[in-house]
Image (cartoon, helix red, strand yellow):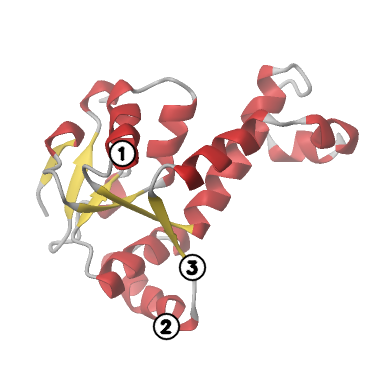
Amino acid sequence: MPVRPLPAIPSGTPILIDANIFIYTASAQSAECETLLERCAKEEVIGVTTFEVLSEVCHRRMVAEAFEDGLITRESASALRRKRDALARLRRYQAFIDEILTISVLPLELDEARFKRSSVLRSRYGLLTNDSLILAAADLYGIEALATLDEDFDAVPWLTIYKPDDLR
């Protein structure tokens, strides 16, 4: 499992994109993550993600938006859960998700085959459930590259990991 810098992804490469890449883009913490999504939009690389990743991004951005707007005092879903009226007024997080869906990043659906494959991979590589679902998507679709800052994938020998250098 080689680990390489995010800007080193060769043109034309199918790349599975983890949630943290989208999060660091949305929060303007990484120019390299933003550039990757721009490359996907231009179809220089073949951006792929999963609906589970999009769900995680949606959840994390919703909580972050509520915190940024002063609706909650800490970035916590439990704090936001009690603010149902505020939830209905949040909009920026959904606009970001809508943007992802329009920039040539293909979201893969979860099906029984991938769910079952994730169990095997979870045991083999010692991964948590969501990470094993991402790895199962890569495995079943023949994708050998992953954009992430997550170190849990570093032990997967057949996967090339691309990480943003501007966050390390």
Is residue 75 at least partly visible in the picture?
A: no
Question: How far is the residue under mark 1 from the one under mark 2?
Answer: 27 Å
- The residue tagged 1 is 149
Question: How far is the residue under mark 3 from the one under mark 1?
Answer: 23 Å
> Which secondary structure lies at badge 3?
loop
Identify the amino acid type marked 3. Answer: Glu
The residue that appears at 87% across and 38% down in the rendered structure is: 84
Residue 50 picture location, percent across and down: 44, 58
* Mark found first going from the N terminus, 3 or 1: 3
The residue that appears at 74% across and 20% down in the rendered structure is: 73
Residue 135 picture location, percent across and down: 32, 64
Residue 146 picture location, percent across and down: 25, 51
- The residue tagged 3 is 109
Asked whether the beta carbons under mark 3 and mark 2 sit within 8 Å of each other, the answer is no
* Mark found first going from the N terminus, 1 or 2: 2
Q: Label 2: few (<14), some or many (≥20) within 10 Å?
A: few
Left/right placement of residue 77 relative to residue 31 reads right
Residue 20 in the image: above or below residue 33: below
Left/right placement of residue 166 relative to residue 120 reads left
Left/right placement of residue 58 relative to residue 159 reads right
Identify the amino acid type marked 2. Answer: Ala
- The label nearer to you, 3 versus 1, is 3
Residue 65 in the image: above or below residue 146: above
Residue 91 picture location, percent across and down: 71, 31
The residue that appears at 48% across and 28% down in the rendered structure is: 26
Identify the amino acid type marked 1. Answer: Leu
* Viewer-side residue, 43 vs 7: 43
Question: How far is the residue under mark 3 from the one under mark 2?
Answer: 11 Å
- The residue tagged 2 is 113
